[in-house]
Image (tube, helix red, strand yellow):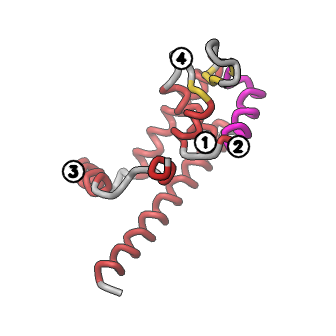
Amino acid sequence: MTNKTREALLAWLELLRTSNYIKKTIDAKLRAEFGQSISRFDVLSTLERGQRNGVRAGDLSRMMVVSEGNITQLMSKLLRDGLVLRRNDENDARVVIYSLSDEGSLLFNKMATAHAKWISEVFENLSLEHLSELRELLDQLPSKSILEAVA
């Protein structure tokens, strides 16, 4: 094993460890303060970005890089809780479009404010310059999803 390969593996493990720590920390805070998981927050966030016309179910699963089965499971609970609305596409009744309800939008906005604060706290030990450097380094890594690569 070359030194570069060893360092790449160590960097990968550190990136994974740190990413998992941040995700679990944010998930715990979202559950404690809002009774919502990070997965539900991610769905609401994705719908917020596509709020004007809603988001097709298939597009939602691709945007979140999860299976349509996972989306269906998440959406049934969000629908039940009144946070999301479901309608069929007017041009193709087989296509389902999801959007935030007023209640979902209100909850998401509260969660997004808290989320931004918590993420800022996670990175508080890094200077603005270091945060920029970190982003530049991460931008040099491949980021095309596996799903995009095989499609």
Mark 2 closeness class: few <14, some 14–19, many ≥20 residues within 10 Å: few
Q: CA distance from mark 1 to mark 4?
A: 27 Å
Q: Earlier in the sequence, mark 4 or mark 2?
A: 4
56 is within the stretch colored magenta: no
Which element carries disc 4, helix, strand or loop?
loop
What type is the residue that disc 1 sits on? Leu
- Which percent across, then down, holds residue 52? 51, 16
The overriding secondary structure of the stretch rendered in magenta is helix
* Magenta stretch, residue numbers: 70-85
- Seen from the viewer's position, the closer of residues 144 and 39 is 144
Residue 50: give its label.
Answer: none
Q: Residue furthest top?
A: 90
Q: Quadrant of residue 76?
A: top right
Q: At 45% across and 38% down in the image, what residue appears?
A: 116
Q: CA distance from mark 2 to mark 3?
A: 41 Å
Q: At 27% across and 57% down in the image, what residue appears?
A: 137
In this rendering, position of residue 133 left or right of residue 66:
left
What type is the residue that disc 4 sits on? Asn
Residue ID for mark 1: 30
- Seen from the viewer's position, the closer of residues 109 and 14 is 14
Residue 69: give its label.
Answer: 2
- Which percent across, then down, holds residue 64? 54, 41
Q: CA distance from mark 4 to mark 2?
A: 22 Å
Q: Quadrant of residue 81?
A: top right
Query: How many marks can you see?
Result: 4
Residue 53: give its label.
Answer: 4
Residue 129: give its label.
Answer: 3
